[in-house]
Image (spheres, grey):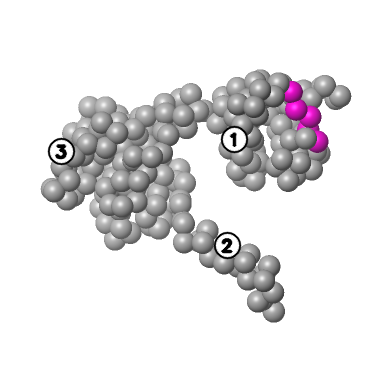
Amino acid sequence: MSRKENISSSVIKRLPRYYRFMLELKAQGVERISSKELANMMRLTASQVRQDFNCFGGFGQQGYGYSVNQLHDEIESILGLDSKYGTILIGVGNLGRAVAAHMSFEERGYSLEAIFDQNSKLWGEKIRDIQVQSAEHIEDFCNKHHPKVAILCIPKEAVGDIAKRLYACGIRYYWNFSHYDLSVDYDDVIVENVHMSDSLMILCYQISEKEGNLD
């Protein structure tokens, strides 16, 4: 299986789910799984599973199924989880602290290298053995270590200035919790926006629909 261009976003968004299920199956000692069995786990159709994998060349045999270990390794490679992209995090409020402390970056393709905040009371504090630095040191760190990715856990109103500085340092990839639309200002950046409030509202809709509260 190899990376291909022009893969739909819906297929890409399913890959992490496939990967999680492969991790669970490996932990259970399962060696092979059919497209039908995997489809049942994913709540998809067997045809959809096969189509997803065919986007990357496909593998497995009819009546023989997929090797769990091979599927795990191939999806890991497609997602680039062995890349260890150098990453910095901006903002050590409640959200930033939780992300820095509990996210398994190394297992997701990243290497968290530095953490920055404007609050001088936080400077010198260690999270994951990484010392929080003044945001004034961002340029010095970037010029020396050339990180690829920035995680933004700062208020929306603070992003504009920070983004200009990060962009000037050559950072083009962002995991953005701020609700600030970076793609409007920079057409050559790749941003994964995280809107937890949107997710919560979607859940509210689904509950209301299930409970019969929607006309």
Q: Using the image as rendered, state which of residue 166 and residue 132 is in the foreground.
A: 132
Q: Does the magenta stretch include residue 33?
A: yes
Q: Residue at x 75, y 39 (%)?
A: 39
Report the disc number at residue 203: 2
Q: Tell me which numbered mark, 2 or 3, is placed earlier along the sequence.
A: 3
Residue 138 seen from this side:
no
Magenta span covers which residues?
Answer: 32-36
Q: In the rendered structure, are the residues bearing label 3 and label 1 in contact, judged by CB atoms less than 8 Å apart? A: no
Q: What element carries label 2?
A: helix
Point out which mark residue 162 bears: none
The quarter of the picture where the N terminus appears is top right
Which residue: 82% across, 21% down? 64
For label 2, the crowd category at 10 Å Cα-Cα, with few meaning under 14, some 14 to 19 and many 20 or more, is: few
Within 10 Å of disc 1 (Cα), the crowding (few <14, some 14-19, many 20+) is few
Q: What residue type is labelled 3?
A: Gly
Residue 144 as seen in the image, left or right of residue 30:
left
At 22% from the left and 46% from the top, the residue drawn is: 117
Q: What's the residue type where badge 1 is placed? A: Arg
Which residue lies under the disc numbered 1? 20
